[in-house]
Amino acid sequence: MTGINNKNSYPKSLSFSKKESKINLIVHGQGVFIFNIKDKEITKECCFRIYNKAQTNGLKVKFTENNVLVNEIHSDEPIIDTNNKQGLTNKNGAYYWFSVDSQNQRLYAGIGEARICTVIYKYQFVQNKQNKKFLESLVTIYIPKTSSSYLQTLHPLKLLRDPITENIPLLIKDTNCLTMDNIAGSKFLPASNLPTSSKQLYDCISGNKFVLNTEDFPEFSKAIEYSLATPGCWCYEKIKSKSTEFNPDKPNILETYLRITLGQNNGESPGIPYVMEIWPPQHYSPVHNHGGSAAVIRVLHGSINVSLFPYLCSDPEGVEPCCTHDFNMDDITWISPTLNQVHQLRNIDTKQSCITIQCYMYDGNNNTHYDYFDYLDNDGKIQQYEPDSDMDFIKFKETMREEWNTRFKPMNNTSLFSILLKKILCY
C-alpha cells in the first residue's frame, strides 16, 4: 500500500556530480521516484535511467510533451503502453512519478500524487522468471548531465520504498471491525497500516466516547444547528463575518466554516492539532493542501463530501479531482505527507450541518514544519492560510449551552398574570 508506510522517505543520498545525480532504491527492484520540472516553460522532455548494479542493463525513461517512453537499455527495445497519450504538462504545480514493481512485474507512471487514479502510463510484463529477475536487478536511478541540462530541470522530490499496486482505501477500520472479506476486497484501510503519526492521531479520536452529544450536554449538535440558523447567535454571526476570509475582495458566505480548537499548539502540527470544523448546509472550503502534515478526519455529525486533487494547481482552469467520496457519521479518513494532501471539503446537504474533527501532526521525518495550508483563491492563485481558531472548544460548548438554554424564555406566573391583567384593562 504505497505512500503511507512510515519507511517511505526523502532520498537520503543525492550525490550530485558534474556529470550525474545518483539515487539508490530503498529496496532493489521496487519503489516510486517522484520528481518535478524546474524549467517547465523551456523543457520539452526529461529523462532518467534505472540501472542494475553493474550498469549493464536497466530502463531508460523519458517524459515528453506527448507521452512516456520507456526502453530496455541493453537492447533498446521499447516498452510501450499503447494507451499512453500524456506526458509533461504546462500546468502549474504539476509533478511526476515512476513506479517499478518487480513482484507484480509492472511499471506505472503518473502526474501528481502517486496513486492509481493519476496513472498516465502502464505496462504489464509477461509474468515469467526472466522478467522478474530483470526488474529485481534494478538498484539505482541515474539522472544524466547532458547538453540539455536534464539535471537542472529534473528535480528529485521523494523516493518511496514500495511500488504502486492498487487503490488505497480512504476509509479506516479498526482491527475489531475488520473481516476477511474487507481485507480481500481492499475496501478499508486497517488502522494498523497508517503511518506512525496518523495512527497516533487515530488512536486519540477513534474511541466510542469521542462523540459530540455527551451525557452532560445531549443536545450539543441541536444547539449548534440552532446557533447556525438563528440571527444574533454566535455561530450565525461568526459565519457571516468570515465571508471574506479566503477572498477579501470577493465575499462568499458559502466558502466559510467554523474552526473550534481543542487544546494548544505544541509545535508538532500546522496550527492547533485538534480542530472541530462546522460546515453549514452547502458550505465548502477552497481547494487546499495540509502543509505536508499527516492527518485524520472523523465525521461527528452529518456528512461531508471530499474531492481529492492530484496536486495544487494554480492555473485559472485548475485540474479535475482524481476521486471523490462521501463520509458519514463516525467515518474516519486519513492524510499522509504523500497522499490525500490536496482536497476540497463540501457539505452537499441542503438542510443538515456537518461537524468534523480534523487532527494534524507533522511526520517524524518532517524537519521543515511548514505552518500554513496553501489554498486556491477565486482567481486560481495560491495563497497562504495560517490555521487559526474561531473559539476554544470548552468556551464554545458553554456558549452553545447558554444559547440553547435561553432560546426560549419561559414566562413565570407573575409575568403571565401581568399580561392577562393588561388584556382585561384594555376591554
Image (tube, helix red, strand yellow):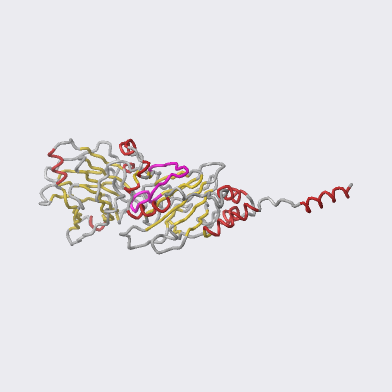
Picture residue at 41% right of the left edge, 54% below the top: 204
Where is residue 177 shown, x and y percent of the image? 38, 41
Instruction: Give, as a single range, the part of the protein colored magenta.
Output: 322-342
Residue 146 can be seen in this image: no
Q: Is residue 330 left or right of residue 71?
A: right
- The number of discs equals 0
Instruction: Quadrant for residue 87, please give it.
Output: top left
Where is residue 342 shown, x and y percent of the image? 39, 50
Picture residue at 40% right of the left edge, 60% below the top: 269
Q: Which is nearer the eye, 237 or 377?
A: 237
Where is residue 39 shown, x and y percent of the image? 30, 56
Residue 163 can be seen in this image: yes
Residue 22's place in the image compared with 353, above or below, is below
Where is residue 355 shown, x and y percent of the image? 50, 49
Q: Is residue 16 magenta?
A: no
Q: Is residue 345 left or right of residue 43?
A: right
Identify the image quadrant of the N terminus: top left
Instruction: Quadrant for residue 15, please give it.
Output: bottom left
Picture residue at 16% right of the left edge, 45% below the top: 136
Q: Which is nearer the eye, 330 or 83?
A: 330
Residue 345's place in the image compared with 149, above or below, is above
Q: Is residue 319 left or right of residue 123?
A: right
Q: Is residue 336 magenta?
A: yes
